[in-house]
Structures are given as C-alpha cells and as structure tokens.
Image (cartoon, grey):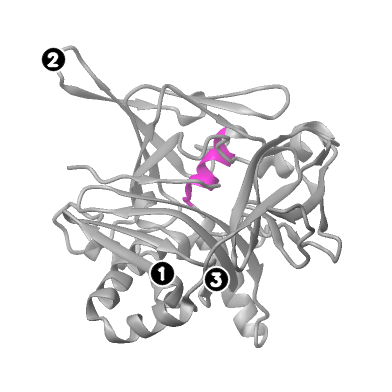
Amino acid sequence: MTQTVRVRHALPLLLLLATAAGAQPAVIAGTVRDADGAPLPGANVYLSGTARGAASGADGRFEIAGVPPGAYRLVGSMLGFAPDAHDLRLGPGERRAVDLTLAPVALDLGGVAVEAARDDRWRRHLERFTTTLLGESANADSTRILNPEVLAFHSRWGTLTATASAPLVIENRALGYRLTYDLTEFSASDIRVSYDGDERFEPLTPTDRAEADRWAEARARAYRGSLSHLLQALLSRTAEDEAFSGTHLMTDPNGVRIPFRVSLDGFLERDADGWGTLRFRGQLDVVYAGESEAPEYLTSEWFREHRRRPDTIQRSGLLLDGLTARIDPQGTPEDPDAIMVMGYMAFERLADRVPEEYRPPPDL
C-alpha cells in the first residue's frame, strides 16, 4: 500500500523576474494580546516555514517588513499559550494589519519530564516520533529535539498520535539551523503519516569557516530535488533545464494505470501576477537527475524496491487533493494540504528542509 506524507510547506530566473516584474515587498504589523485583551510582550511572531519573524514589544506590537508577495501563515507563539495562526495572501506593496490572540494553556512540564525518564514505552514512542518528524537521512543524524519532555503520546490500533505542551526546539547541526516548531497534529501508522505544524528557522552561528562552508553545501543539497525546488522550476518553466522529468499515470476505464512521458513545464499555468495553478489528474511521477539517492533511503520505511545500491536519480510521486493546487510566486502551495508526495520526497523530512525563501548561491 502506498504511503504518503501531507506537506505544508513550502526562484530561478532572477527570483522570478523580481517577483512578478519588480513587485514591492509587503509589510505585516499588529499586536499580540492575551484572551483578556492585555498586550503580550516577547511573543514569537513568524511566517511559517521561513526565517522571517519578530518578537512583540512591551506594548505587544510587532512588524515584519520586506515580505515578498505570496501566501503565508502568520503564527504567534509563546510558552504557556496556545499558538494563534492566520493564513494570509499578500499583494505587492501591501501593508496588512493582523492582531493575534493567544489563549493560556496549563503546563505541567515537570511531571512529564519525570514520566519520560522512567517510561520505556514513552521512549519508544519518542524514537518513532523523532524518526517520522525529522527523517532518516544523514541530516537527521545530526538533528535533535532539545526539549522532548513537552511531548505526550497515545497509541491505538497501530496508530501513534502526539501532542506538545510547548513549542519544540530543534537544533539541526547538519544544515546550521535552530527551529521553533509549533506542533498542531501528528499521526503515524504503517500505511500513512500525517503531521502538521509551523516552524521558524533561525541560522546558527558557525564555529569556523569550515563549518560555514559545510552548511552552505549541505543547504544547497537539501534544496536540490525538493518539492520547493520543483515548484519554483515549474513557475519559471525551467524544470527540464534543472534536471526534472516526469511521467503522468492515468487510469483507463478498466482500472489499468497507463504511463505517459510528459513535459513537466506544461503542468503549471502561470498568471501575470506571478501566481500559478498546478493541474493534473491521477498521479505525476517525477524524476530528479541532479542528485543521487542517499544510502539511507534504501533502509527507510519508504523504500519498497529490492536493490542494494542507491540510484543516481531520485524518484518521487505527486498527488493532488482535487484537480488543482494554487502556487504563490515564491513556489509555496496556498493550501498546505493540496499536494501529497510519495517516494523520495516523502523520505526527506524536517531535518532536510531549508526555509522557503532559501535559494542556492550561484557557485553552489
């Protein structure tokens, strides 16, 4: 049975011609308050999946400037409060006012920490959760959750669910980021994984030039062949030039799946404002020839073939929840649930992710 991952997240040609022909960046400003209307200073306000964010001031006010037009989720987060999120579609030069309200939640981290230290079952659940969320790649080996004690697990009929009483703090020493991750949903079974959350990236400070160079190269590798890379290439109609190719699988009236070799550049219609519509029926198989498979892929739960050596190409599958998916000028799906991935893109997880605004330097 096919396993799928629901993804949220997520520009060549000179940043897609400066984002639709020189479009002016947007600004988001507002106030973070508690349920009684009092301002909350020090709240973490960020655009999910990016390194763009700010902290609220003493009066609860915040401002995030220089935001390219597109689709975003604005999240307000603070220890002791439930996150508040707003989905936004920002136009060129727009100044959007958004007020966030954070409701208090009860915290009992000490009790959870004691239970975690004594409960072997909790540890097994944590291992499965970590592998599912962070992945099984070499990058995941250098990534860890710094505060696992905030997690609680429930297992029923082979399905593991998880909740977090506070934002997860994740340190990725492979790519050089610290992530604040607000977990909103997690469910994992033998046939399907579904998780949702909002993350803010903060670059770590390298210890020396050698580490900085390693991080730069690792970030470029993580980007190449990703869903974000593919969608940006489709927007700029450079998918084939950037080593992507595709096969469209259609089902005939007898239920037989028929493959058609296709040009990927024809599957996304780009509007004059830089937005695009990805449109297809059935399944779209994507091959990326710019990077080899990681050796860890062959031993992962997502690998279903019988071979011992990694391939020189990466194979993935795409499904649409419906017939279309709207893609913003940055290559991010407007609806985070619109696209499901299989194969190699499903193997890559949070430890292999770079911020949505990341673009590889020309020399990498």
Q: Amino acid at mark 2?
A: Asn
Residue 313 in sight in this render: no
Residue drawn at the location 45% of the way across and 78% of the way down: 142
Left or right: 294 as drawn, with respect to 90: left
Residue 233 is covered by the magenta coloring: yes
Classify mark 1: helix, strand or loop: strand
**Separation of disc 2 and disc 1 at Cα?**
47 Å
- Say if mark 2 contacts mark 1, CB within 8 Å: no
User: What x and y, as percent, mark residue 355?
Assistant: 61, 57
Residue of label 3: 175
Question: Identity of the amino acid at label 3?
Answer: Leu
Q: Which mark is residue 295?
A: none
- Residue occupied by mark 2: 254
Residue that appears at 55% across and 71% down: 175
Residue 123 spot, x, y in % from top left: 29, 77
Q: Which one is closest to the eye, mark 3 or mark 1?
A: 1
- Which residue occupies the extreme top position in the image? 253
Mark with earlier residue (2, 1): 1
Image quadrant in which you'd find residue 359: bottom right
Disc 3, SS: loop
Task: Kindly identify the amino acid type of the residue bearing the numbered disc 1.
Answer: Leu
Q: Which residue is mark 1?
A: 151
Tell me which label, 2 or 3, sits earlier in the chain.
3
Tag 2 secondary structure: loop
| N-term-proximal mark, 3 vs 1 | 1
Image point (62%, 50%), residue name:
84
Tell me which segment is drawn in magenta. 225-234
